[in-house]
Amino acid sequence: GFENHTKLSIIHPAFPSTMSPPSQSSLKEQIRQSLSSVSLPSIPPDILSKLAALSTSLRLTPSQLAEAWEAHSMTKNVDQLNDVTYLGYRSALTKEAESRGVNIDSSTNNANKVVVKRTGLGKRTAPSSSASISPIPTKRGGAAGGAGAPIKLDGNAERDGLSAVDAVAHTTPGDGPVSPSAKNTTSHHPDSNGSSSTAMSVVTPPKHTLPSQAQLTPLTYRERPNPGVTLISYNPRNLPTAVQVMEESASRLSPSEREALTSKRGCTIQMHPEATHPTKGFRFMFTPLEKRASCLESRLLEMNEVLMEECGIREEETEEEEAVEEVGLESKVGENRGEKMATWAPVGVPKQNTVTCIGRICNEAHEGKVNSTSLLLEGSRQHSSGSRIHLDPTLIPSYSLFPGQIVAVEGINSSGRTLQASRLIEGAAPSLDTSLASELMEFQHGSIKGMNGMPLSIVAMSGPYTTKDNLEYDPLVDAILKISEDKPDVVIMCGPFVDVRQPLVQDERGAIILNEDGEKETATFQQVFAKKVAGILQELYEANTDIKTQFVLVPSVDDAISDSVYPQPPMVDLEVKTKGAAAFGSLGLHAVEMAGRETSTGNRPKRVHCVSNPCTLRINDVTIGVTSSDVLFHISSDETNANLPPGSRLA
């Protein structure tokens, strides 16, 4: 069918065929008289010639030109028509013509023709009810498009018994491109008298096979293909997995030795000693601006010292003193970065020579994404009084910058307002962790808190752990079944555990779950976690009393059981002793610690570790950073870069 959002271009003469266009001299005289009637007696000859051409191309009569000038002069407060005011007058005429569906043809060969357009704002209509143009009178005195009256389109093609819109509708483009040869192809159809007439080519859109109802129906979680199949694996050295090593070691041992090996194996999970993440809940959104500014200042000063030490950046006085003493000694300045960096200078201080400034990247615009023209470099309050200057990165071969990033920039700041950067150091990596040889031996071969010679196995997974149609936590159940088979040492579970985007959680009465009888009932978010997540973990330890797996729970900003702030404090389980139903706010994690254990057991290793989001952990001698938020996505959404090699963005 015909869709009226398709652009139609119908070219026809500017004047009806029954009327002969007026000569240029008479048209100019008519325009002069019409404009003189609206208090515009004098018009330059060149402007008058332009108005005559404009009248012909836009199909405007001289009186319409005069009315348009009267409105334009009152709106713009002008009383003369010259080279300057003509541009505004022409724009007003063009906009008015476009609102009526008429535009100036850009072709020089069709200067006396107009183009009638049909925009795509209307509804889809059939060919019989489609929008049509006004009929064009012919020399025979009939209206074009009538029965038996030929219609001429651009003076070449004609069809019998069809209106102009119908003629173009048969040539509307389909889904694919049309070749030039197909556009120029014509077909001959005999008319009622038996004679043939030339007609425009008919381009039929290709037919698309609609998918069946079975293909449109989405698969459920249980119907997914190839469950449990490994999709991708990164092992460039083809090392055996921890499960394979443990199975091979156990095959060479007797049952008693195998039991002793698994029972004495364990690992230590603790927070990194230098981590500054929250360890308990806090009052958020009450931090004063002064404290926020103080935190930003301390971070900038800390990174200033790290970058100066890492890149070998020296202050101007220090470099002058060392220039006298540096005789026959090899300088170690910038040994970590290759070339020597220029001397350090505060941000915003004019310098005629090359200097190095350390500051924070900011966006000059309060809204919108940062770009190369809106980059600002903010210095510290202690060294630069918080000055901000423009950062011009055009001379840097490649860069990747985002607001909040602390960088060291080498360049020239001759005016004190713009730093012409020539070199960029995008931050510094933290120092590597070190461990004593005795600690490594204890971690790897210790029989009490070590691995007893076995490899360390860590599994990580991320929520949500439910499907959209229920809160049965089927994906989590399958994951726990796999964990019961492989028995890894540590499982890192990132939220959300009770997803606020789950339709059954968004009910105002609470989460809708199924009870033991299969009936729907409402429950609090804490009860959902205690029954589904903590309950599944409890069943794991009850069925496998000898399992040594430890779980690390990381909350998410989409969790209904945690505060939606970042950084996010760890989840808290209120171990309240009550009779009957669980206490309000209890997550049921204390029941996981007691599952399969005797109550009289004193010093029990912890099974579940609730940590903050983000957090930095030390599992034996391995340091791991964990967060449930996609920080790279948020950074890349407000990042600007240039000339980066493939695969190195945000690296």
Image (cartoon, helix red, strand yellow):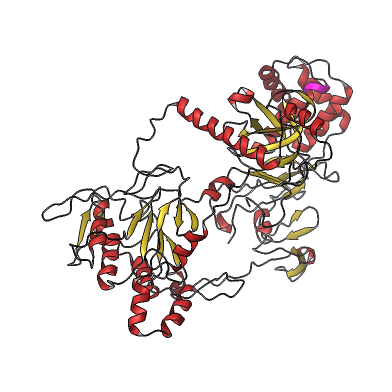
Q: Nearer the viewer, residue 262 or 488?
A: 262
Question: Please, which residue is most extreme toward the left here?
Answer: 579
Residue 81 falls within the magenta-colored stretch = yes
Report the number of discs: 0
Q: Position of residue 97 (x, y in %)?
A: 69, 35
Please state, as top left, top right, bottom left or bottom right, where the N terminus lies in the image: bottom right
Q: Is residue 360 above or below residue 432?
A: above
Q: Quadrant of residue 26?
A: top right
Q: Residue at 48%, 77% (x, y): give it.
A: 245
Q: Which residues are magenta?
A: 79-85
Q: Position of residue 5 (x, y in %)?
A: 60, 52
Q: Nearer the viewer, residue 638 or 233?
A: 233
Q: Is residue 487 above or below residue 494?
A: below
Q: Quadrant of residue 300?
A: top right
Q: Position of residue 491 (x, y in %)?
A: 40, 63
Give the left or right position of residue 210, taking residue 156 as reference.
left
Q: Say if residue 226 shows up in the picture.
A: no
Give the left or right position of residue 121, taking residue 24 as reference.
left
Give the left or right position of residue 391, taking residue 460 as reference.
right
Q: Residue at 36%, 80% (x, y): give it.
A: 257
Q: Position of residue 244 (x, y in %)?
A: 47, 78
Give the left or right position of residue 389, taking residue 571 as reference.
right
Residue 57 falls within the magenta-colored stretch = no
Q: Say if residue 431 shows up in the picture.
A: yes
